[in-house]
């Protein structure tokens, strides 16, 4: 049986969606079965309309099926990513994560491998705080939190050992440096998830 990887993202203007796609690509290269899912837009219409790029992205969506609790239960490993919002995770993504209490109470989230990623408009605008705050949830689940570290030479250049990230200053789109780091994160997630899943239970 293939290792099962879930990628859940929220994106308002498309940056984090591209990071999610790169991570999924890296995971898929290992032969893992990969599901990419998004979450519903919950911002008030006025907030969405205040940014033409946000409105255009929302109008064109949803870009993937919405993540369910079944997706989470299914996964051996998961990656969660969204844009940095005032130095922390986006509420849209947090809302999905906050719906996992039932699975948590049954111990069904323990021992999954979990990693996170983000996009922010400035280099010191909260990339790491967002990743670390997302990871806090994984600790409560009893998941195995997976950092990127500098496990590949590419990561010394892309520069975020906490998780894949991109600085979208002046509305730039994710570049090859960032996308390469996300592919590595996906491959690493699938590889480590295979070790954990096959070591823990017969498949
Ligand atoms: C309400 C709001 C809060 C934001 N907070 C931050 C922030 O704290 N730091 C930062 O660098 N960028 C911040 N941004 C910018 C986004 O994180 C950034 O544009 C990101 O690349 C968007 O990703 P997306 O295209 O996936 O939505 C904020 C944007 C909005 C709309």
Image (tube, rainbow, N blue to C red):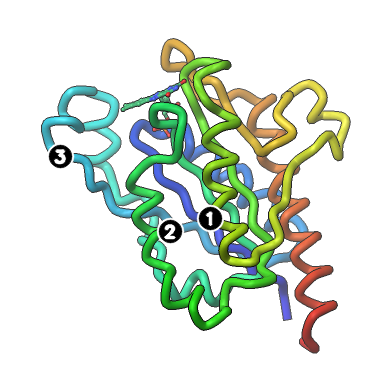
List x then y, in percent, for residue 12. 34, 35
Q: Do the residues labelled 1 and 2 touch (CB within 8 Å)?
A: yes
**Along the horizontal axis of the image, is 31 left or right of 43?**
right
Q: Residue at x 57, y 16 (%)?
A: 123
Secondary element under disc 2, as helix, strand or loop, is helix
Secondary element under disc 1, as helix, strand or loop, is helix
Give the residue at mark 2: 97
Front-most of 88 and 187? 88
Front-most of 52 and 108? 108
- Indicate if the residue with disc 2 has its beta carbon within 8 Å of ligand 1: no
Q: Are marks 1 and 3 in contact (CB under 8 Å)?
A: no
Of circles 2 and 3, the one toward us is 2
Q: Residue 172 carries which label?
A: none
For this orientation, the residue located farthest to the left is: 46
- Indicate if the residue with disc 1 has its beta carbon within 8 Å of ligand 1: no
Return the disc, 2 or 3, that comes first in the chain's sequence.
3
Give the residue at mark 1: 137
List x then y, in percent, for residue 124. 56, 16
Q: How crowded is mark 3: few (under 14 residues within 10 Å), some or many (20 or more)?
A: few
Of circles 1 and 2, the one toward us is 1
Q: Which residue is drawn at 73% across and 24% down?
A: 159
Quadrant into which the C terminus falls: bottom right
Return the disc, 1 or 3, that comes first in the chain's sequence.
3
Of circles 1 and 3, the one toward us is 1
Q: Which mark is residue 44?
A: 3
Quadrant into which the N terminus falls: bottom right
For this orientation, the residue located farthest to the top is: 170
């Amino acid at each position: 049986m293939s290792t099962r990887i879930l990628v859940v993202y929220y994106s308002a203007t498309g940056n984090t969606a591209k990071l999610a796609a790169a991570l999924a690509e890296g995971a898929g290269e290992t032969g893992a079965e990969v599901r990419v899912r998004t979450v519903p837009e919950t911002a008030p219409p006025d907030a969405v309309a205040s940014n033409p790029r946000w409105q255009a992205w929302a109008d064109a969506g949803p870009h993937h099926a919405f993540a369910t609790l079944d997706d989470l239960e299914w996964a051996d490993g998961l990656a969660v990513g969204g844009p940095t919002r005032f130095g922390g995770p986006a509420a849209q993504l947090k809302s999905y994560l906050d719906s996992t209490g039932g699975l948590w109470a049954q111990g069904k989230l323990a021992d999954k491998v979990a990693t996170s990623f983000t996009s922010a408009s400035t280099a010191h605008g909260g990339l790491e705080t967002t990743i670390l705050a997302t990871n806090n949830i994984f600790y409560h689940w009893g998941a195995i939190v997976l950092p990127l570290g500098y496990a590949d030479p590419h990561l010394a250049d892309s520069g975020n050992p906490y998780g894949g990230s991109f600085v979208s200053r002046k509305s730039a789109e994710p570049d090859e440096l960032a996308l390469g780091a996300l592919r590595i994160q996906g491959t690493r997630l699938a590889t480590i998830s295979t070790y954990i899943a096959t070591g823990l239970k017969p498949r």
